[in-house]
Image (spheres, helix red, strand yellow):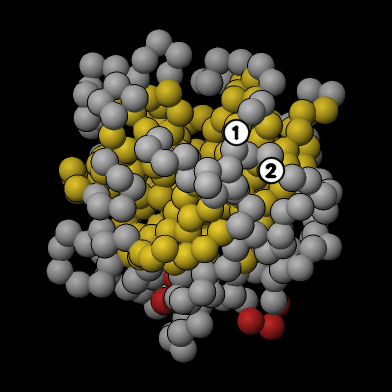
Amino acid sequence: MIPAPLYKDPIFNGAADPMVIRKESNGLYYMFYTQRRANQQVEGVSYCYGCAIGVAESKNGSDWHYRGALDLEFEFGQNTFWAPEIVYDRKNGRYHMFVSYIQGVYINWGGDSRIEHYVSDDLFHWEHLGWVSFGSARIIDPCLAPLPDGGWRMWYKDERQNSATCYADCPASSADLSAWEYRGIAAGDTPQEGPNVFFLEGSWWMIADVWDGLAVYRSDDMEHFTRQAENILRESGTRRDDQGRGAHADVFVTGGRAFAVYFTHPDPAYHPRSAVQMAELKVEDGKLTCDRNAPFDTEWEERK
């Protein structure tokens, strides 16, 4: 059975914004996350700034251990990295990371933000290629999916557009995934963050953190999304450290099953502490559902 919590950062106790990818060369699973400095005695929300990207490893998707933090700095100072998104481009055999970046550390929420682009052959050592521009100085939380005819689509939060989820396309002709064109707003009915798009049971789904659980949208074409009435991960769970709403989730799809990997703030008396949890997503009567209390096994392929 899946342990609860699934994972806690052993260095700063502040794992947030997790995403999971399976490494092509060894079949192991890797979790990349915002390494918030939750156990540091600091002013305001500065524990959410100056963050590195933490890395955890698993053979089977249920047992995770800490491997370290990525060195992504490319300019002076201690800077802020949030919410990584990593995809494998089979055309060139390299991993691409798109990660939210803010220069420096802030005590209150603020600072211009942009999405930085890196490439890697091994998931541990990353080359900085530059940053992605969509005409806004307040964009974060990228999510990517391959387009059916080649190329990629990116969804992200634009705080300058009432925190809507916007999207942009990169054509197949862009060998290094650097030529992005802004397309418009994918979901703007309410402010949101942390969009994640995936394919399950014949439909495209998008989830987004609306600070009242996760809003769910469905699409047939990856472009026009319709919101379902019910949010998921809205009510508190009963498992250890699964209290409070589920926040900023990734969805890992494998073997026809989908797993939400999200984080919680389980301790109201000490809000900065966070834990990563996992729950299975299912499609029932055309709606995406998630029972975060239901027991399940991952049945992911285990590499010895």
Q: Residue 273: where, in percent of width, then height?
A: 59, 75
Could you tell me which residue is drawn at 46 percent across and 84 percent down? 40
| Occupied quadrant, residue 230 | top right
The vertical placement of 259 against 69, above or below, is above
Q: Nearer the viewer, mark 1 or mark 2?
A: 2
Could you tell me which residue is drawn at 53 percent across and 21 percent down? 222
Number of residue marks: 2
Alpha carbon separation for disc pair 1 and 2: 11 Å
| Occupied quadrant, residue 241 | bottom right
Could you tell me which residue is drawn at 57 percent across and 30 percent down? 198
Label 1: few (<14), some (14–19) or many (≥20) C-alpha neighbours in 10 Å: some
Residue type at tag 1? Val
SS state under label 2: loop
Q: Which mark is residue 298?
A: 2
Q: Tell whether 42 sits left or right of 58.
A: left
Outermost residue, bottom side:
41
Residue type at tag 2? Thr
Q: Residue 302: where, in percent of width, then height?
A: 58, 43
Front in this rendered view, residue 147 or 106? 147
Q: Would you name the residue on which mark 1 appears?
A: 253
